[in-house]
Image (tube, grey):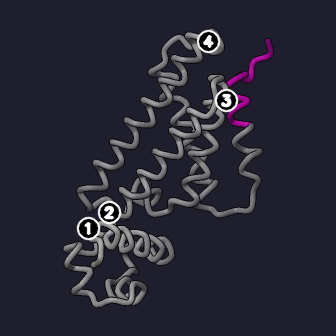
Amino acid sequence: MVNKEEFRKKIIITSGHIFSRYGYKKTTMDEISRALKMGKSSIYYYFRSKEEIFEAVVLHEANILRHELTTAIKSVESPVEKMKNYVFVRMKAFEKLSNYYNAIFDKNLDHFEFIESIRSRYDREELAILRLILYDGARKKVFSVANSEYTALAVQTALKGLEVPLFWEKKEMNIEKRLSAILDILFYGIIRK
């Protein structure tokens, strides 16, 4: 007997690979069914449409990212290390989780209702995590933060600004050096003390 949840997960993972290779628009149900070695009708038993599969793929990748970020933050005590881990894991994860990344940033996918809710949820969760790290750092007298809300927004904006050159241009560059430079500015500023 086939476990329904396991089979559903297999469809999501396999479809995720295809969506990341060809993009949402160019992926067909025929390709998904061929990759799974099953008829389209069997897939339609679990998902009503390609859009529904894509939504499940994006949510699956969102959960992976959430788990990786939580693990990275909890693995260290220092607020500085928490922020470093958060930034590095976040930026590296977007390379692996291309469907989630595309759902959040690709304007061609705006017509899907679920995309906007995923985007706003992602922004809210990210701001909450950043505020928590900043608050923890200020409480431990490691960070000097006048307003954790605005500081979290500034950090989020800086990270979003890095995404375009890092992932859309696909240039050969040392991601660690660029992230370290951003973190140095974040932690130490540019004004001589």
171 sits left or right of 158 in the view:
right
For the N terminus, the quadrant is bottom left
Extreme-right residue of the structure: 192
* Residue 94 sits inside the magenta stretch: no
Residue 184 within the segment the image draws in magenta: yes
Q: For the point 63% across and 54% down, which residue is it?
A: 165
- Which badge, 4 or 3, is on the more N-terminal residue? 3
Q: What kind of residue is marked 3?
A: Glu
Q: Residue at x 59, y 48 (%)?
A: 91
Q: Are marks 1 and 4 in contact (CB under 8 Å)?
A: no
Of residue 162 and residue 124, the one placed in the foreground of this image is: 124
The image shows residue 112, relative to residue 124, as above or below, that is: below
Say which element carries label 2: helix
Q: Residues within 10 Å of mark 4 (few under 14, many from 20)?
A: some
Mark 1–mark 4 distance (CA, rounded to whole Å): 45 Å
Mark 1, secondary structure of its residue = helix
Residue 81: which numbered mark, if any?
3
Which region shows up in magenta? 181-193
Q: Earlier in the sequence, mark 4 or mark 2?
A: 2
Q: Name the residue nearer the viewer: 35 or 7.
A: 7
Closest to the observer, 23 or 75: 75
- Foreground tag (1 vs 4): 1
Residue receiving disc 1: 52
Q: Which residue is mark 4?
A: 144
- Disc 2 + disc 1, Cβ < 8 Å: yes
**What is the number of the mark on residue 56?**
2
Neighbour tally class for label 2: few under 14, some 14-19, many 20 plus, Cα within 10 Å: many
